[in-house]
Image (cartoon, rainbow, N blue to C red):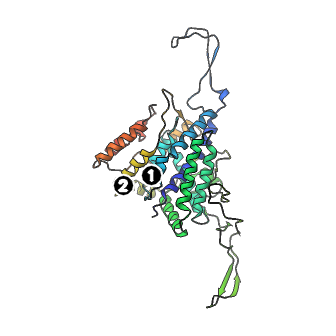
Amino acid sequence: MSARTLPLLFLNLGGEMLYILDQRLRAQSIPGDKARKVYFFSSPCNSCSYVSNDVLFYMLRVDEWTDVDRKRVMNDIISTMFNRKFMEELFKPQELYSKKALRTVYDRLAHASIMRLNQASMDKLYDLMTMAFKYQVLLCPRPRDILLVTFNHLDAIKDFIYESPGILNQVDETFRQLIETYNCLSDGEFQLIRQTLLIFFQDMHIRVSIFLKDKVQNSNGRFALPTSGPVPWGTEVPGLIRIFNQKGVEVKRTEFTTAGNYVTPQREGSFELYGDRVLKLGTNMYSVSRPVETHVAGSSKNLASRAKESTVPNPLAKEELNFLARLLGGLDIQKPAGGEAGFRLNLFTTDEEEEHAAQTRPEDLSYKVINIEAAQEPARREELSRILGELEVAEPRPDSAGKGEDLLALMDGL
């Protein structure tokens, strides 16, 4: 297991999260001059201190977004994601922790602005994030190209930033950290990073409609990898066997026919702050609007084994608790100002679909409970209590008691 994997995992999943949120915010947004209109007529208003004659008052529903709201949400999340102290903790060499521990961080990150997601939408968001990055890792021509995938995500994130040089500088600083940390690593170290990522993703087989329609994913949730396309940079197209003698001199060549159609890449992608990455993996696949659905795949045996795994005491409980405390402590969550209400974002086409997804999702794939035993760690409990108190959102959320809002209460119940 590589101790340098966490920053790449977090940044790439975060990039996919921003792609999805931007696409959904654009799909549900309305022009600012067409916000929902409410008319007040010339009769006394019992609930207000004024009387109006055909006054036109603009009111925005909680599920109606303007482009201004979208830009604000993206700026808030990106600013929190690239917080300097958070990045410092992230880039420290450390092992990967459980999926549920990381999922908690993304839940907090997604709610770093006025936007609110309920449990079903958050589950779908996380499924889309993880399956997209898993596909990109599988398709990387060489292990080092995972860094190019990360750069593609960060390039796109910079385009999401609206009129905020400070946030842009935060992303550029993370770019420099990536270059300084990873450009000097050997191919063997990148191979270990790739293996660590694939181990993290190996039990995740969520069917995604966009992959199924493009025929790159099978009905069981496993990806169908192509047998054609560009070969890794620095290698040759297969089809030729060279035979050398004991002195290293080539004495014979034999050609053979391959089943795939391979091509040589024109040039290597840029590993600098600015440049052409060449590789398209990690770019925004939601730039062309089309509905994306997710479905849980796998046999009941697999689901049962995962449920059993979630109930087994975690030997890294103390380390995961420390990890959560450090990461959540680095997140700078911005609360809505004053009595400002949050806006709900639905990742499903209708509210009915969202409710159905919440009811039919297997219990073991729900991220309501985090397997960390905190009973013997009063100091960490106190630190997490302080951190989560700072992250507390004033606006009441529906069914909040069952959605993991109070992490310490859930730990007590383990």
Measured as percent of width and height from the top left, residue 141 is found at: 62, 65
* Residue at the image point whose x is 58% and y is 51% from the top: 208
Q: Position of residue 224 (x, y in %)?
A: 60, 62
* Foreground residue among 341 and 289: 341
Amino acid residing under circle 2: Glu
Secondary structure under the numbered disc 1 in the rendered image: helix
Quadrant of residue 187 within the rendered picture: bottom right
Residue 105 at x, y percent in the picture: 46, 47
Above or below: residue 255 compared with residue 48: below
Q: Which mark is residue 214?
A: none
Residue occupying the far bottom of the picture: 246
Disc 1 marks a residue whose amino acid type is Glu
Residue at screen point 39% across, 41% down: 387
Residue 293: tell me if it is visible. yes
Q: In the figure, is residue 109 to the left or right of 266?
A: left
Q: Quadrant of the N terminus?
A: bottom left
Give the residue pinned by disc 1: 89
Q: Please state if 169 lies on the left or on the right of 257 as rendered.
A: left
- Name which of mark 1 and mark 2 comes first in the sequence: 1
Kindly identify the residue that appears in the image at 65 percent across and 71 percent down. 234
Q: Position of residue 335 (x, y in %)?
A: 48, 34
Report, in whole angstroms, how far the alpha carbon at label 1 lies from the one at label 2: 14 Å
Residue 134, picture quadrant? bottom right
Q: Going by the image, does 136 lie left or right of 118?
A: right
Relative to 276, 102 lies left or right: left
Q: Answer above or below: position of 400 versus 135.
A: above
Label number found at residue 319: 2
Foreground: 252 or 371? 252
Say if residue 218 shows up in the picture.
no
